[in-house]
Image (cartoon, helix red, strand yellow):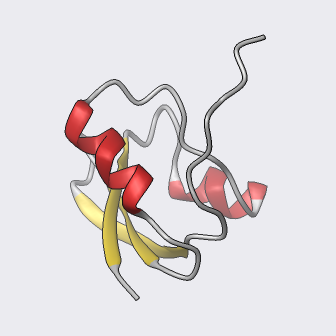
Amino acid sequence: MAYWLIKSEPYKYSWEQFMNDGRTHWDGVRNYAARLNLRAMRKGDEAFFYHSNEGKEIVGIAMVIGEAYQAYSG
């Protein structure tokens, strides 16, 4: 099992919103290194949810429930 750090600006998608949703997916990632890391995540890995800009702290722990997939652009 691997451990990852995922970040989100709380005004865009907060830990509280994640907890309300119960699950989410990360898309629209433009940073090349971040995309490679997302593709390396495996089911069962854990991720530390980090609030960037405001708070600048780890606010929770999440579990990867699915691996990266190619989005259909149909």
Q: Nearer the viewer, residue 2 or 59?
A: 2
Question: x and y percent of residue 48 in the render?
Answer: 37, 71
Please tell me whether residue 28 is drawn above or below residue 49 in the rendered image.
above
Q: Nearer the viewer, residue 27 or 20?
A: 27
Q: Residue at x 75, y 63 (%)?
A: 22
Q: State which quarter of the image contains the C terminus.
A: top right
Question: x and y percent of residue 17 in the render?
Answer: 65, 51
- Residue 65 left/right relative to 45: right
Q: State which quarter of the image contains the N terminus.
A: bottom left
Extreme residue toward the bottom, this view = 1
Q: Residue at x 38, y 60 (%)?
A: 40
- Residue 23 left/right relative to 62: right
Q: Quadrant of residue 21?
A: bottom right
- Residue 25 left/right relative to 11: right
Please tell me whether residue 62 is drawn above or below residue 5 in the rendered image.
below
Q: Quadrant of residue 9?
A: top left
Q: Residue at x 72, y 23 (%)?
A: 72
Q: How many marks?
A: 0
Question: x and y percent of residue 35 in the render?
Answer: 35, 40
Q: Residue at x 71, y 59 (%)?
A: 23
Q: Nearer the viewer, residue 1 or 12?
A: 1
